[in-house]
Image: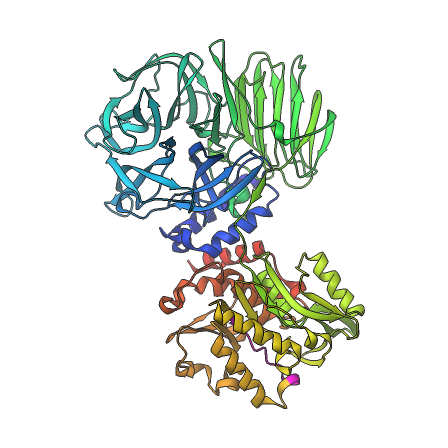
Amino acid sequence: MNKKRDYYYEKLEKMQFLAKNPYYADRFSFQNASQVKINHKLAANSEFLNKVHISPFAGLLNDPNGLAFYKGYYYIFYQNVPQIAMHKTKLWSCFRTKDFVNFESLPILIHPSIKQDWDGVFSGGAIVEDGKLIAYYTGNTKKWLNEKDYIRGSATIMCEFDEESLSFKPKEVLFEVDKEVYTGEFRDPFPVKIDNKYYLFHGAQDKGTKKGVISIYQSEHYFKDFKLLGTLKINNFETPDAYMYECPIFFKLGNYDVLSFSTQGQKYFGGNEKNDHVLFLIGKMDFENCVFETIKVQHSDLGFDFYACQIFNNQPSEEVIYLGWAAKPQDFEIATFDDGYAHHLNFPRKLALKNGHIYQTPYFLDVLKSGIKIKLSDTFILENKAYLINFSDIQGDFNFEISNQNGDNWSIKYQNNTLICNRSNMSFLQSVDTGLIYQRNVEKISKLEIILDTSFIEIFINDGEQVFSSKYFITGEKMINTNLKGEIEELKSYNFEQLRDKTILLPGEALIDRYQIENKVVDKVGGAPLNVCGAIGLLNKNTYFLGAIGNDDEGKMIESFFSSNNLNKNYLEVLPSYKTTIANVILDASGERNFSFLRGADKEFKLDKAPSFDSLVLSSATAFLGGNLLDTYHMLTDKAVNENKIIFFDPNYRDALYSQNLEDFVSKAKYFIEKANVIKLSDQELKLIFDLEVEKINELKYQNKIFLITLGKEGTLVFLNGQTHVIPSVDAKVVDTTGAGDSFFGYFIAQFIEHDFDFANLQIKDFEHIIFKANICASFVIQKHGAIESLPSVKDIEMKFNDEYFKKQ
């Protein structure tokens, strides 16, 4: 336990440190498209990523916002920090769905862009009026008094969604906080239409008392003329310690009115628990006098992880659908930080009023049921799936535990009308300072319906009379242990349709690198374009190698490698009449390599018609020898130039291939350099092609071209429009440099293409982090034999990147 606490605090300190680094903390870091893509890839491979709960596309997910049904889609906007899984400047991202099975991820939709939201796009709601989807949100600003203190500003802003462009139209500032009445803690406008009048409910802090309140603004129009109706007087309800109310919503349920909001500062339970809770207030609303008459107060969730809830406006049926954030404001998620994301939403709940009590049941659950039910008792081994568990005849006390073979566990037990949840012994602890063990008085539990996901559990008690939500982080193979008897059913996973990867083509050779290691012949799959292709493929699924291999053992080895590594084989041609190209690799004592080639099928690769693509990578070591492959080079280059597609070029000089015909090699290299946008050369190739030493690179007269000059252990020299800068390499033990340049170039390309850089105005500082990460990728590869087979994971690269940043400070 102490080791787990120590790790928690050590990791938390590092996370907080990294979050202050300008790379992550700058107001516009969300525009770092390659980092966002990396975080998305990391999250997709996380063992904790849930299957039936909405997680962010990348980074940190915060409050659900603007929930609305509009023209056949449920829109789920959410606060987001895509560049790091920590709280930084907020913006709005979005998913939409027609069926709560298939989801579409939309681009970032609202971000800081005007002075009234310069320090963050905070929460808000949405309404459908005049056939338009209208969002309201809080624009956050900070006027800094010194390094620690600031005055917060708050503006209520409206914008209209454009379904054609999937973007919002220009922002309209409706009003700013009235600082005669409230402090700057004023946010989360939620729109309600009653009797042809429009109301905006805000969470606020009273200026005089510094206590949490709800503020209501009113207008005859949804788009202008909002005036302060007043601070809502809530009768029969007191929260003397609550310094802030957040995310208020209002709706009707049966014959009653319901307020739901989150209170900060008020403790409802003992111990050191989180003091952020979500309540239902059931009663009657008097808009004329701005009074809410409370009949009953009820907790929305008894567990650890539930906050900032909203309902879907414009719901096509009369049902009230309630969706919250599965976290609390002060939560840090150390378990998933290195996986590039934090938090998720709860499962949507349908609300119903029975005997004056709000019941909550899972909504859109039936569409996920597999129909295959298994009896559950004692022990059950869990797979990496979501499950629905039902215990329908509970007679007394019980226990339910999720554990692994290391003894890590999360558990609940029910004893003497007390439900106790213990997450003090999970593999990764969560929110240590605000309670690891919760106790709740629940009189008579007879039924449980449990949605068990890979790192989140929602327990619906007695047909939804109460709900208990909790994250749990247990690594490895997990199992259930319980004394209850019931049924367990697998749930189908949500399907997320993601943004399309750009299409990248890499014509060239796939070959066998043949080594002599300790008097043994060792074959490795290689070839410069294939190595580059593998590195790009770490981030991009639409990467295509174009080349030919023979129908021999070496060719079959390459085909098998493609299959086992999920590489696209659409343009991998097998030529029965030719042998696969082989490169005999000779390594010296320092790991530096040289080659001798047995050229085969690669020269015969030919395209009848150039396919569509977004980017072209020319990195073949053999293409300049001629044959159909060189014709393919020219065909694709002409298409790229005519269609203004970005071209990356690496001549990949090999002494064994071109030393007898240097003039021809130099001529061809210069031709393609003229066509290319990004050129990678070694310092030796710079000398060979331009007769320039590195120190005189400024003599190159090319405009709007990036030159990446690899300097071995010294790093990478970047040259662009007269700018030069050396990006350092990363120390590593050198075993084999065969794939160093290719892996560097590939991972550079993988990141670079995510950005739409304007070469004419580009500064090296805008992409130096991309080069540094590419250097890190190469540093892993040189520690093993081979190239594509030695590529690190994206997670390896990111963790090394963050470690290196940590060292610099």
In the rendered image, which quarter is residue 662 located in? bottom right
- Residue range corresponding to the magenta coloring: 648-657
- In the image, farthest residue toward the top: 355
Q: Position of residue 651 (x, y in %)?
A: 56, 78
- Which residue: 68% across, 73% down? 605
Asked if 378 appears above or below 684 in the picture, the reply is above
Q: Is 154 left, or right, of 640 in this rendering? A: left
**Residue 462 drawn in magenta:** no
Q: Is residue 212 visible?
A: no
- Which residue: 63% across, 31% down? 368
- Which residue: 74% across, 63% down? 559
Q: Position of residue 683 (x, y in %)?
A: 51, 80
Q: Nearer the viewer, residue 148 or 540?
A: 540
- For the N terminus, the image quarter is top right
Q: Nearer the viewer, residue 62 or 138?
A: 138
- For the C terminus, the image quarter is bottom left
Q: Is 301 left, or right, of 548 in this rendering? A: left
- Which residue: 48% across, 29% down? 323
Asked if 455 appears above or below 450 in the picture, the reply is below
Q: Is 760 left, or right, of 352 in this rendering? A: left
Asked if 123 appears above or below 569 in the picture, the reply is above
**Residue 655 drawn in magenta:** yes
Q: Position of residue 309 (x, y in %)?
A: 44, 28
